[in-house]
Amino acid sequence: MKSILKTKNETRLVLPKKASDRLKSIRYWQDGMSITEISNTLKCTRQTIYRWLQSVDQRLSKNESRKREDFSVEDKNKIIEAYILCKRPSMRVLSEILLAVFGLKIPPTRLRRALRRWNLDSYRPSGTFDSLKRYQHS
C-alpha cells in the first residue's frame, strides 16, 4: 500500500519495500550492475531479479504497441472529415489526401484499422471476386 510522508520541507510518496526494491533493481540494471550484484545488494534471489526485469520489459513492449494505434483528437477529426468529404475513397487515396492537405503521413492499412474501430469503414470486395465462386467445392 502506498503512503504519503509529509515533512516540513517536502511531501513524498513512500512505496512498500517490494515496490521500492523493484524500482531499485531496474535502476541498478540500467546503470550496468550484474544480476548477481543486484540480488546481493537487495538481498533477494537472482530469479526474482530476472522476473522483475522480465515483467517490466513485457509491460513496456505492450505499451509501445498500444501507442502506435492511438491518434490525437485533432488527427482523428481530420481523418474522418477527409473520409466523409471525399465520399469514402480507397485507403490509398485517403492516405495521399491526408498527406497533401494536412501533412499527416499514415499508411493505408493503419487507416483501415482505425476506420474499422470507429465503425466507418464499409469495405466490400469488388465484383471480380464473384467469378471465383464457381470454382469453390460445395
Image (cartoon, grey):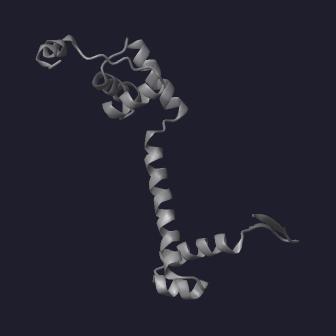
Q: Is residue 114 above or below residue 28?
A: above
Q: What x and y, as percent, mark residue 38?
A: 53, 83
Q: Is residue 128 left or right of residue 1?
A: left
Nearer the observer, 46 or 53: 46
Q: On the image, which quarter does residue 87 sit in?
A: top left
Q: Residue at x 54, y 82 (%)?
A: 45
Q: Is residue 18 above or below residue 114?
A: below
Q: Is residue 34 above or below residue 110?
A: below
Q: How many marks?
A: 0
Nearer the observer, 13 or 44: 44
Q: Is residue 15 left or right of residue 37?
A: right
Residue projecting furthest to the left: 135
Residue projecting furthest to the right: 8
Question: Which image quadrant: the N terminus?
Answer: bottom right
Q: What x and y, as percent, mark residue 19?
A: 65, 69
Q: Residue at x 39, y 33 (%)?
A: 104
Q: Residue at x 69, y 75 (%)?
A: 17
Q: Is residue 15 left or right of residue 131?
A: right
Q: What x and y, as percent, mark residue 131?
A: 13, 12
Question: Which image quadrant: the C terminus?
Answer: top left
Q: Is residue 77 above or below residue 89?
A: below
Q: On the image, which quarter does residue 97 sit in?
A: top left
Residue projecting furthest to the front: 138
Q: What x and y, as percent, mark residue 103?
A: 39, 32
Q: Residue at x 59, y 76 (%)?
A: 24
